[in-house]
Amino acid sequence: MNHVLLEVCCGSADDVIEAWKAGADRVELNSDLFHGGLTPTVGSLRVAKRETNLPVMTMVRPREGGFCYTEAEFAVCLEDARVLLENGADGLVFGFLRPDGRLDRERTARLAAIALEAGKEAVFHRAIDVVPDWRETLDQLIELGITRVLTSGQEPDVAYGTATVREMIAYAAGRIQILPGAGVTPRNMARILAETGASQVHVAAQRSCSDTSANNNRAIFYGGCLYPPEDRFAMTDRDVIASMVQSLR
């Protein structure tokens, strides 16, 4: 198998460090992975860049729940994009749609320009998985100079969207990178790569970690109505990522 680039979805600086130790090629740094990934802190980016030599793509997403933002939210995106690049981001990951689910070309162009003018990558995320016409959207993204698109083939799990991802790669014809992701595991990764013909893959693998500092009062919860246990947190599973890296090598 030719070299396949492995990108790891990370929610913290520790996640990036674990991915790096496992042999990952690139990471996408977020916060709040539970909601699909939001803009990370500058501190997490700076630590990730200081402690590893990995290319770090940083999410620019001001909130969960769709991709059509208020004027204030978009202004925050512009500010975050500039600050992230100033602090070492190797690329920006973003997606802007109109209320009808079609590409917001103007906002996409503005974020792409910020990244590309800085000599960095511009990545359109899985917002493409909810557009009504992915071919039309790819054409527009190509015209705007977008580097790469992250997609599950418009399915909840890329394992079910491999045919569409393969179509996307053929349609793109080298004009834009297609990065399959969402639901990739050690068991299905080889099949996904074989069925899509992709040269890179986006994965996430986390293990549960313990923090006992909140155990003195088990009645207290700081989260929302889901009430997540306060003595657990997630971190990238280095062993799982390493096994995936090994299988690709």
Image: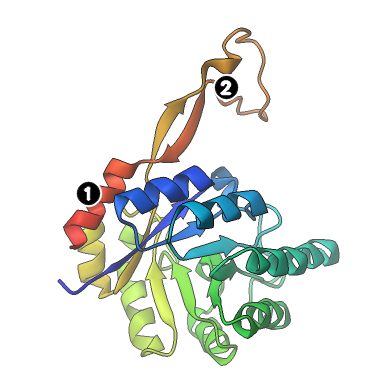
Q: Which residue is mark 2?
A: 230
Task: Give the farthest residue toward the top.
Answer: 216
Q: Is residue 40 visible?
A: yes
For the residue carrying disc 1, how many other residues have a C-alpha within 10 Å: few (<14), some (14-19), or many (20+)? some
Task: Give the farthest residue toward the left.
Answer: 1
Quadrant for residue 174, please give it.
bottom left
Q: Residue 135 in the image: state x and y as whole percent.
A: 48, 84
Give the vertical position of 58 relative to 103 (above or below): above
Q: Residue 218 in the image: state x and y as whole percent.
A: 60, 10
Name the residue nearer the viewer: 87 or 174: 87
The image's colour scheme reads rainbow
- Residue at 48% across / 74% down in the picture? 149
For the residue carrying disc 2, how many other residues have a C-alpha within 10 Å: few (<14), some (14-19), or many (20+)? some
Residue type at tag 1 = Ser
Give the vertical position of 90 relative to 46 (above or below): below
Q: Which residue is mark 1?
A: 243
Residue type at tag 2 = Glu
- Residue at 71% across / 73% down in the picture? 98
Quadrant of the snapshot with the N terminus: bottom left
- Residue at 37% across / 45% down in the picture? 205
Q: Residue 233 in the image: state x and y as whole percent.
A: 50, 31
- The residue tagged with tag 2: helix, strand or loop? loop
Comparing marks 1 and 2, which lies closer to the viewer? 1
Q: Which of marks 2 and 1 precedes in the sequence?
A: 2
